[in-house]
Image: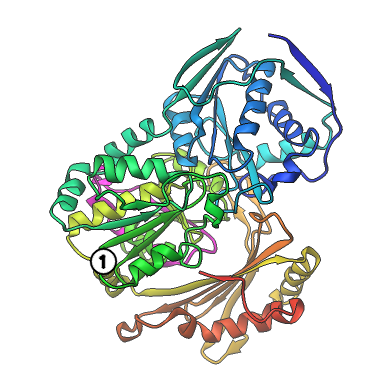
Amino acid sequence: MKIKTHNTTPYDDQKPGTSGLRKKVKVFQSPNYLENFVQSIFNSLDDFQGKILVLGGDGRYFNRRAIQVIIKMAAANGFGELIIGQGGLLSTPAASNIIRKYQAFGGIVLSASHNPGGPDEDFGIKYNVSNGGPAPEKFTDTLYANTKTISAYQIAEIDDVDLDTIGELDLGDLKIRIVDPVADYAELMAKIFDFDLIKQSIAAGLITLRFDAMHAITGPYAKQILEGQLGAAPGSVFNAVPLEDFGGGHPDPNMAHAHELTEIMFGANPPVFGAASDGDGDRNMIMGANIFVTPSDSLAIMAANARLIPAYAKGISGVARSMPTSQAVDRVADKLSLPCYETPTGWKFFGNLLDADKITLCGEESFGSGSNHVREKDGLWAVLFWLNLIARKRQAVADIVNEHWQKYGRDIYCRHDYEAVDTEIANGILEHLRSQLNSLPGKSWGENVVKFADEFSYTDPVDNSVSANQGIRIGFTNGSRIVFRLSGTGTVGATLRIYLERYERDILKYDQDAQVALAELIEIAEQLCEVKKRTGRTEPTVIT
């Protein structure tokens, strides 16, 4: 195998965000852009020669080309084995499972998650460590430093690899394994959930379902598991074929983008259960007949009912949520005397807690939830959890949700996103908020009296690492909260996210529309941050 060293010059924009590097496809197609970042990953690793690297992605445009480049660079840098999903496909949770199952050194996952795909849209790449989870900040800081000093990369001069035929290939000292992307994941799900019970419930007509794969990676997984193994009617999984541009859609599982599913679930004669997943399969939207379950409520309900699931029948060790996620799961943890951790946004922050067995379940408001079975959030896992729960409780989704609210109260919650805000304006908004923090405690707007105002900082209870500047929190004495945060998942400008939460114990008010119930907090948020005034916009880009 001939290895060639190419001289290169650094790019100054390769700082990984909360889950890797995301840019427009055309940026990744710039000369040596991908090669620089991949070589910088390898330059940040120690003692990987001869070890296993897992490789796959969500199938979006540029996925196959990028995989061929990474194969040749991994060969040149001395990896001993590559495990690659057939067709270059692996959902993010499936990749995490394969890293863990085959004790790989790590993995490279190609995805921009819920962002659009296509020649003019987004692409992404991230490195996962040996526990199957996203690399921690210590690694990504080193990686970023290496991207700024890189001067050369190594690549093997070999032919492109056939990604579509399952089997093994030896290239000198390198073994390449092309594997069924679904098989290992489906095997894991069957160990966690009661497939027999779910299958019986579907066969008896107690569960009818629709799953929108959004022309993204979970299509093959959902077809095999939901229709093939559990017996859901043919066509229950729709938009099931992964496409490089996601069929021209936006593979973000919320009611705005999964509008076809939403129309089904709020239309005439809806099925019992509806769900959607995103571009790389790590997010989920849960719905029932005429009801949308917020991700925050979904996490809380799963925590409250975990013992009904075979894998968690003996109980769970604790729970965790990202800071902007509603406090609904905190109330469950308090009643069940479980540890509950509040972390920054980004799944990597759950990894240490899971590895140390401090938590079993975790989730975030951005449609992600998961458990200790992998080290990524897992959309189809959440779908199967709910199907198992419905089969055990023999209740409709709405009844399960209302029963939970009656016991724990309802955290009325929503998120307002202002996307593609000019970066300078967005940073100015955050500075304006910071300047008010010291003066806010004790200030009141009607019944909303500020209890605390701070910028969230997290100290990891396992390794004591500190992550500062993780968002602005405004907490009120009545349990309400407003959180402001700039998101790192977009590729144009900045996304300002405003999270609004009000705790309600009055059972007669549980059916309130969130925008009506949160109207006062929405107005307070604007007074505090002035996003409409500063951007000239009249409303958020997306409300979830």
Answer above or below: position of 475 versus 368: below
The three-letter code of the residue at mark 1 reads Ile
Residue 233 x/y as whole percent? 24, 50
Of residues 264 and 437, the one nearer the viewer is 264
Q: Which residues are magenta?
A: 304-329
Q: Residue furthest left?
A: 204
Residue located 79% across and 46% down the image? 13
Q: Position of residue 314 (x, y in %)?
A: 25, 45
Q: Is residue 280 left or right of residue 383?
A: right
Q: Quadrant of the N terminus?
A: top right
> In the figure, is residue 315 to the left or right of 123?
left
Which residue is disc 1 drawn over?
400
- Relative to 456, is 162 above or below? above
| Residue at position x 45%, y 42% in the image | 354
Placement of 472 over or under 513, stated as above or below: above
- Please identify the residue farthest to the bottom as the structure is shown: 446
Q: How is the image coloured?
A: rainbow
Q: Where is 142 relative to 387, above or below? A: above
Report if residue 305 lies within the magenta region: yes
Which residue appears at 82% of the width and 40% of the height? 11
Q: Give residue 64's quadrant in the image.
A: top right
Is residue 15 visible to us here?
Answer: no
Q: Is residue 249 left or right of residue 65?
A: left
Q: Position of residue 403 (x, y in %)?
A: 25, 70
Residue 305: tell me if it is visible: yes
Q: Quadrant of residue 32?
A: top right
Q: Is residue 156 magenta?
A: no
Residue at (27, 71) in percent of width and height: 407
Crowd around label 1: few <14 · some 14–19 · many ≥20 (10 Å): some
Q: Position of residue 175 (x, y in %)?
A: 54, 14
SS at circle 1: helix
